[in-house]
Image (cartoon, helix red, strand yellow):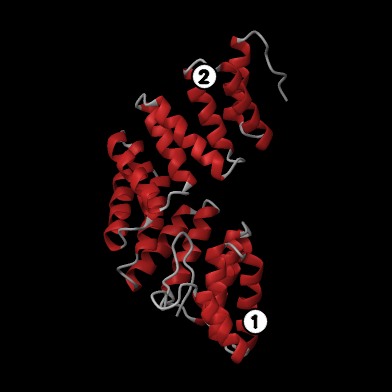
Amino acid sequence: MMVLLVLGGLSHQQGHVYQDVGILYRDILSKNPNSWLAHNNLSAVLIERGEIDEAIAHAKEALTINPNSAEPYNNLGAAFHKQGKIDDAIANFLKSLQIEPDYADALNNLGAALLAQGMTGKAIGYFVKALHLKGEYAEAHSNLGAAMQRQGKIDDAIAHYREAIRIKPAYVDAHNNLGTALKEQGDIDNAIVHYTEAIRLNPDYIDAHNNLGVALQEQGSINAAIDHFLTVLRINPNYEKAHNNLAITLRQKNKIPLALKHFRKAVEIDPDYTTARDNLNRLLQQQARPIDQK
């Protein structure tokens, strides 16, 4: 069955036949409105597209028709996770597991939600159980890698990211995550390789562009770094970290007015972004015009 994996992707069972599988499920529902499976599968497609409100409506309709199905609860949990409603996500993953205790996708997704709440140890337990049930599970390996990285176990994290990529070579999140772990180890050259691959697979992947920009900046490739930060801001003008990082590179090129502009924009977007505020304050002090502190 089609379900959405947090930090993973959908496995479109008929993607080679239908360019838009959502059309297929809407067609099924136009002929059979009581198909809980079509409601469930359409909700998963909509979550991946970011159409969360409609996804929630279809998952709830699936549960109205078949209240004893685990998959719609899993999809509801994934939708709430996308909305940042982590407590609601956890509640629905737990309901899914009450119905089907060995549901590997719900175990993985519950682990991801717990990880988002900072409960790393508990999250690891769910990722491990998911992997016992479904060994060739790229998303669970990547999530477990993220948990290990958070614990400072970088070698273990790298091993799990590499396993995720072995299983699913085009897994963009795993390439980006592996890049961050390699960079943390000081292996910037190979980090750049994986950031670059993530961008090749998804040219609009802003986290990978931002991470690649930082890595290139550290290597002294300032102009190339600037290009990646500008790409991020073209896609998402409110990405505060890219404004801060761009400002740092502009300051290195002695483009002070532009650097000040982007530091200010980072602070405007997120007033609690202390790194950007400190950078702005420091640069203004160098210009003999200190900023008032909050």
Residue type of the residue flagged with mark 1:
Glu
Which residue ends up furthest to the top in the rendered image? 288
Q: Is the residue marked by circle 1 packed among few (<14), some (14-19), or many (20+) residues within 10 Å?
A: many
Q: Which quadrant holds the N terminus?
A: bottom left
Q: Which residue is mark 2?
A: 251
Measured Cα–Cα span from mark 1 to mark 2: 54 Å
Q: Is residue 248 visible?
A: yes
Q: Specify which label sits upstream in the sequence, 1 or 2.
A: 1
Instruction: Label 1: state its secondary structure.
Output: helix
Task: Indicate which label's residue lies in the foreground, 1 or 2.
Answer: 2
Residue 289, quarter of the rendered image: top right
Percent across and percent down for residue 120 are 46, 53
Residue 291, above or below 269: above
Q: Is residue 136 left or right of residue 117?
A: left
Residue depicted at x 57% and y 69%: 46
Percent across and percent down for residue 256 are 57, 16
Q: Is residue 95 visible?
A: no
> Which numbered tag is attached to residue 76?
none
Between residue 130 and residue 240, name the one nearer to us.
Answer: 240
**How many numbered marks have been drawn onto this rendered protein structure?**
2
Percent across and percent down for residue 12 are 43, 73
Residue type of the residue flagged with mark 2:
Arg
Percent across and percent down for residue 69 are 54, 84
> Which numbered tag is attached to residue 61?
1
Residue 189, quarter of the rendered image: top left
